[in-house]
Image (cartoon, helix red, strand yellow):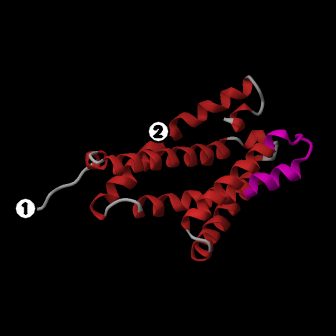
């Protein structure tokens, strides 16, 4: 008889449980940034159609760059560097005046590009850090935790009633 594995097996061993909790946190943060940026078009004070087209272009370029950079840089350094650059772009966008639309658009494009690289690497990272028999369960659990975050993201826009840039800061 073959033994069946499930999501519960991810949390039976301490190392696997810690690894899966950290990966879930990684999925949650990436998903919150990804969809927060998508829903936060009004924070960048751009025309919606132009903003959407530029964000789509950033996604395409980010996927291509992820493939190229994986071969040159490596996974860990690429994820750390992209997280750092994404955070700098979004934190800098908070303090840029809304009159500087082109600079905000460049920051938004750069942040989305690096975020797309991280989003692409989530699947690879999760699959590589888990045993073969648990890979699909690990990816499913990470994706599920990210989807729960995706459900909460539209409500973060209400934070702009307190301060205009609070959703981006969060």
Q: Which residue is mark 1?
A: 1
Dots 1, 2 in contact, CB < 8 A: no
Is residue 76 or residue 103 the one in the foreground? 76
Of all residues shown, which one is farthest toward the left?
A: 1
Residue at left offset 65%, top offset 58%: 82
Q: Work out whether mark 1 precedes mark 2 in sequence or the reverse, and give the earlier one.
A: 1
Say if 59 sits above or below 64 in the image.
above
Q: Name the disc covering residue 148, or none.
A: 2
Residue at left offset 67%, top offset 46%: 37
Q: Position of residue 54 (x, y in %)?
A: 74, 58
Q: Position of residue 160 (x, y in %)?
A: 73, 28
Q: Main secondary structure of the magenta part?
A: helix
Whether residue 45 appears in this view of the structure is yes
Of all residues shown, which one is farthest toward the front?
A: 14
Instruction: Read off the magenta span.
Output: 93-110
Residue at left offset 89%, top offset 40%: 97
Is residue 111 or residue 91 the one in the foreground? 91
- Describe the element under mark 2 as helix, strand or loop: helix
- Describe the element under mark 1 as helix, strand or loop: loop
Query: Is 44 part of what is drawn in magenta?
Result: no
Of all residues shown, which one is farthest toward the right?
A: 99
Assess disc 1: are there few (<14), some (14-19) or many (≥20) residues with their C-alpha within 10 Å of its C-alpha. few
Query: Is 102 part of what is drawn in magenta?
Result: yes
């Amino acid at each position: 008889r073959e033994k069946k594995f499930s999501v519960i097996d991810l949390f039976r061993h301490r190392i696997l449980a810690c690894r899966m909790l950290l990966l879930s946190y990684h999925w949650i943060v990436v998903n919150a940034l990804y969809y927060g940026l998508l829903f936060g078009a009004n924070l960048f004070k751009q025309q919606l159609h132009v903003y959407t087209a530029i964000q789509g272009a950033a996604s395409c370029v980010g996927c291509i760059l992820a493939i190229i950079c994986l071969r040159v840089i490596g996974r860990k350094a690429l994820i750390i560097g992209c997280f750092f650059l994404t955070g700098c772009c979004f934190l800098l966008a908070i303090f840029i005046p809304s009159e500087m639309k082109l600079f905000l658009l460049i920051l938004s494009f750069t942040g989305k590009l690096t975020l797309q690289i991280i989003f692409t690497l989530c699947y690879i990272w999760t699959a590589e850090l888990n045993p073969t028999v648990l890979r699909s369960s690990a990816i499913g659990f990470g994706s599920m935790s990210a989807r729960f975050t995706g459900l909460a993201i539209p409500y973060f826009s209400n934070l702009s009633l307190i301060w205009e840039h609070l959703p981006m800061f969060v």
